[in-house]
Image: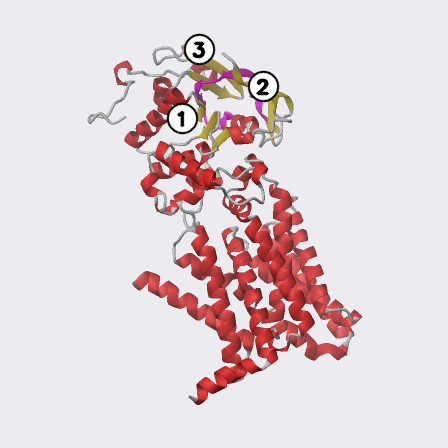
Amino acid sequence: MEPIIEVKGLTVRRGPTEALTNVTFEVDRGDYVGIVGPNGGGKTTLVLALLGLLPRASGSIRIMGQDIDTFDQWEKVGYVSQFAINFDPQFPLTVRELVGLGRVNRRNIGRFRTKEDWESVGSALELMGIAELADRRIGTLSGGQRQRAFVAKALVSDPELLVLDEPVTGFDPVTQERFFMQLANLNQSKGLTILIVSHDLTAVFCRMSRVLCVNREVHGATIVDGTVPDDVLKKGYGEHFHFAFHEHKCRGEFADGRP
Amino acid sequence: MEGLEILTSMFDYQFVRMALVGGTLAAIVSAWIGLFLILRKESMLVDGVAHTAFGGVAVGLLLGFDPMLGAVAVSAAAVLGITYMRRKGMAQSDSAVAVMMATGFSLGMIIVSLANGFNVDLMTYLFGSILTVSRTDLLVLSALALFIIGFMVFFYKEMLAITFDEDGARLQGLPVQAMTVAFNLLVAVTIALSIKVIGIILVVALMVLPGLTALQLGRSFKATVVASTAFGTIAALAGIVLSVLFNVSTSGVIVFTAAGIFLFVAAYRRLG
């Protein structure tokens, strides 16, 4: 399988401390990866470094085979930051306008939007099941609807890699489960590579194919039958950590058969 | 009938026609730029930079060149200075504005005290003088206003993306820093234009009130931009016409009209 992200010997400093130390890992195309780890372990730092939004102290990052310093295809990378939860709800922006912002990039600066742009917006709204919300202001949406709108924005430029930083914070379990299932469908139907920062280990083990456990170092493992080797989690969370896992609850489905 | 005759006859005067054109253009630009400043939570930047521009006006009057050029130059320097201080962590946003405002205004006061001869001229910049705008002033104002409108039309989606989510815009490859500097320079020019219409002291109202009013409507971004410029234009036109009819301060009536529209729309939204 071709790697879409290659990280070698990456060290990142936040102020005087090393947030990530000599990190090496790869993510293959089509992977559905959960980034887990304790608070302050460096999950968001890792994401920001992968997106070129934080400088590296040392090491290298390659995205889609290209060094990150010269990478020029950012429209192929969709990103949903924690801003999706923290933005000003009074900002006068409709869902359609928000998703349309996903089509703005350095290649079309100063150009008016085309019919193709708006068709892509329509498709992204359909894909996330929020077409009927297109003319609603984002500040009036529920948490789950907002998050889907931000994912639609990230998907509107038809990316090959989607990165989400704690997208389900504050969600109730049903909304969270529905959201992760929708992303799993995108991963399977479009072959989209997805990286999600999450604190919900159950959701990560049940829905995703790989896990990266981050605590200054990164320990990766493939998820097999909803489990990962204990030592991977213990390296991230500490030796005292024990994950109680209810296997029969893993493949969650709605009683009415909704996907 | 007599009132209508007075109203129509005022348009026979060239100074009224020029004031209406200049006031409308300045109001459109001010409302549009002002809306972005509100959304960037930088409304008070306007007040700070406008007061700083007082120093530029005074330098222009002292040295005998167009005070508006002095206002533009000092406003631009102030905006860039505030941005630099914030980015380098030298001061928080409000502190940086306060420092620039005090420095620019004190420069103006020193110059005014050194030269006793232009106190009357200075008043026109403190309180605005759209009714005394010259043909040359109008040409300069129109050219600058059209340039700013052109920038905002062509870079509409980029400015919206940067204003909404700066990190997201940066990731999408937009030149965030360059566009922010360009926008800040437009803020400086807009403030200088608005000073001609409404004066240093009330310029913040012309730039902020229309946008605040439009935000009350709770519509899309595009509709909010249109409503903001419409409210600004109505306030400027009504202010000029009413001030000529009743021989009262133009800038005062413009701001009072803008504030009245804001209160009406806010009350309508809550009670309606």
Q: Which residue is mark 2?
A: A65
| Residues marked 3 and 2, same chain | yes
Q: CA distance from mark 3 to mark 2?
A: 31 Å
Q: CA distance from mark 2 to mark 1?
A: 30 Å
**Which secondary structure lies at badge 3?**
helix
Label 3 sits on what residue type?
Answer: Asp
Q: Position of residue B174 (x, y in %)?
A: 58, 39
Q: Which residue is mark 3?
A: A231
Label 1 chain ID: A
Q: Please say if the residues under marks 2 and 1 sit with CB atoms less than 8 Å apart.
A: no
| Residues marked 2 and 1, same chain | yes
**What residue do we see at 49% from left, 21% from top?**
A214
Label 3 chain ID: A
- B28, above or below A24, in the image: below
Q: Please identify, in this view, whether the residue under mark 3 or under mark 2 is nearer the observer.
A: 2
Label 2 sits on what residue type?
Answer: Gly
Please name whichever residue, A164 or B18, is drawn nearer the observer in this view of the structure: B18
Q: Which residue is mark 1?
A: A199
Highlighted range, magenta: A18-43
Q: CA distance from mark 3 to mark 1?
A: 18 Å
Q: Residue furthest front?
A: A115
The numbered mark, 3 or 2, whose residue comes first in the sequence reads 2
The numbered mark, 3 or 1, whose residue comes first in the sequence reads 1
Mainly helix, strand or loop, the magenta region?
strand
The numbered mark, 2 or 1, whose residue comes first in the sequence reads 2
